[in-house]
Image (cartoon, coloured by chain):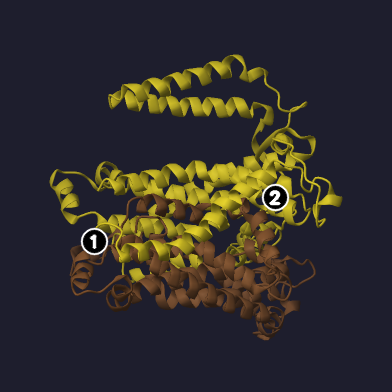
Chain colours: A yellow, B brown
Amino acid sequence: MRGLSRDRLWSIAVLLPSVILLGVFVYGFIGRTVYVSLTDWGNDPAQALATNPVIQWVGLANYQELFSGFLQGRFRQEMVSTIFFTLFFILGCLGLGLGLAMILDRNPKGEGLWRTIFLFPMSLSFIVTGTIWRWMLQPQGGVNQIPTVVGGEPSTFGWLSSTESIWKFDWNKLPLLTAVVVAVVLGVLALRALRAAQRTRALVAGLCALMLLAWSLFVGPNLKLLAAPELHGFNLALIGIIIAAVWQMSGYTMALYLAGLRGIPEEIREAAKVDGATDAQMYRRVIFPLLAPITLSAMIILGHISLKIFDLVYAMSGPDNTFTSVPALNMYLTSFRQNQFALGAAIGTILLLLVAFVIVPYLTSAFRTEESH
Amino acid sequence: MNPSTRFTPGRAATYALLVLAALFFLVPIYLLLATALKSPDAISLTTTWHWPAALNWASFEEAWAKIGGNMGNSLFLAVVATVLAALMGSINGYALAKWKFRGANTLFALMLFGMFIPYQAVLIPLFQFIKSLGLYGSIWGLILAHVVYGLPITTLIFRNFYADVPDALVEAATIDGAGFWAIYRKVIFPISIPGFVVVVIWEFTQVWNEFLFAATLTNTSSQPVTYALSQLAGGQAVSWNLPMAGAILAALPTLLVYILLGRYFVRGLLAGSVKG
């Protein structure tokens, strides 16, 4: 089956339509979005929906506007919200999913039924989930009424309406914080490379980390994105949305972990038992390390879902609640309600960068290992 | 019997935790049913947890009147888009798994990227493109979008599925003189049923549940049910029995698929994490 035989040509020919379609719809459209984000299309409402709008190249002005413009505080809060949301959503799904999988791994009776119960929310739309949980989290009803069942006072927590936030920080410190975090990550990478005796890699990572640290010591503190301090933090109203999201998606991590646990050969567990390991030791020393790759791939899948989530927010607190909004929702509103296409495209591009940051290393490593098999 | 199935404090704790977890997953469903079956004047925030004294099925009729047409749109959309994406994915998966050429993996990784992109990053050009084809507001524009962005996952699932088909089968057929298409028709396609089941369930669910394209590319006459439900539930004056009944209706098709064919649903779920 060597050379360009007829069959081989067919195999390329059948792939061609999909390759062209995806080339246009994914890469072509991304390119177009990036281009639009560098123009002023729609910033003048009169031009937005004109048949032949006058569009001017404005470079990075839209990005500058989003990160430091007077009017775009909402976007900056959303960036912070989406990071907190992603963090707690992933932690919740991993924790609950692993717990459920470990319980099911003990072979309880009716395992199939339990699994069905834990997984069914996965089959629902985020809109359906959002509609149900919106009712659960009404300020004077649902969850807040639970204490009355045992004779207590109803709770008054504003699940979706709270405007309070915690862990606030000044947006002006963002470059500084980012630089420090990246420097720490690079430092860890450098140490690991050093231990694996990869000298070049250790040197490059270490030098970059040092440069970033120096920058954050001497330049970072004096950098001001905004004229005045602008505080952003974790809005408490997001808690309800995170709970609903975990309700919907933790079955997924349970399924992943359960498949992983069932894939661990019985001999390994028995060998650990023979060596005198207690249950806790066996989990910590033997089973959890074996589940690490699953955790990583779950984090990546959940992370990309979380960064682009917006329908759940739309259904739970409506499109106009700025305290629970996320960039993915803002992009839709900016582009298709206000017709500010350039600004919307810039938000879309930022989202893409966030997701690509997570996905590209994953896809690259997945296919590099496969290629070498 | 396995000694671990005997009743011990450890077993009791296992079941206690299971019941507790099941409550977290099922309580919203109880509230959903209770509210959908209440008559509007029986709904008050302080009695949300009470089971209705008299069952009122009228909410379902009313909700159906409002979103039944959209359910039809969704059904047509999901069936057509799923069939097209599944067929194309099957051929793609076959070509990628059984006729490996240089760079096939790179090409496949580039295709897969389309599964992960936030659709917000392509939405504006997509909207323009669909509009320029004259398909804005028609269900066909939505079908086009769903087929294209469904291709990565259907290709992925079929590629992994066909990778498990022994190469010897294909080689034997080649020696018998069968070509690319004959092998697909006579060897590959007949054993693809489990693959198709997984892909169809997965893709149908995805398309049925999608919201962003639904909100952007359609208008009133072609809106799928997710969008209609969000409108139904978003209004302030509406009594809660109506959106709850609507949510049940909108959830029913995918829920049924999941309950009847859960095994295959989970397989699609696991395939979605790239390495099946």
Residue at x 68%, y 47% (from the top left corner) = A345
Q: Is residue B172 above or below residue A67?
A: below
Query: Which residue in the structure is indicated by mark 2?
Result: A330
Amino acid at pointer 1: Met
**Does residue B53 appear in the picture of this structure?**
yes
Residue at x 40%, y 76% (from the top left corner) = B261
- Chain ID at mark 1: A
Query: Which residue in the structure is indicated by mark 1?
Result: A1
Disc 2 and disc 1 on one polypeptide chain: yes
Q: Nearer the viewer, residue B66 or A258?
A: B66
- Chain ID at mark 2: A
Question: Under tag 1, what secondary structure?
Answer: loop
Q: Nearer the viewer, residue B90 or B219?
A: B90
Mark number, residue A47:
none
Relative placement, left or right, of A27 versus A148 is left
Q: Pointer 1: residues within 10 angstroms few (<14), some, or many (20+)?
A: few
Q: Position of residue B99 (x, y in %)?
A: 30, 61
Q: Which corner quadrant holds the N terminus of chain A?
A: bottom left
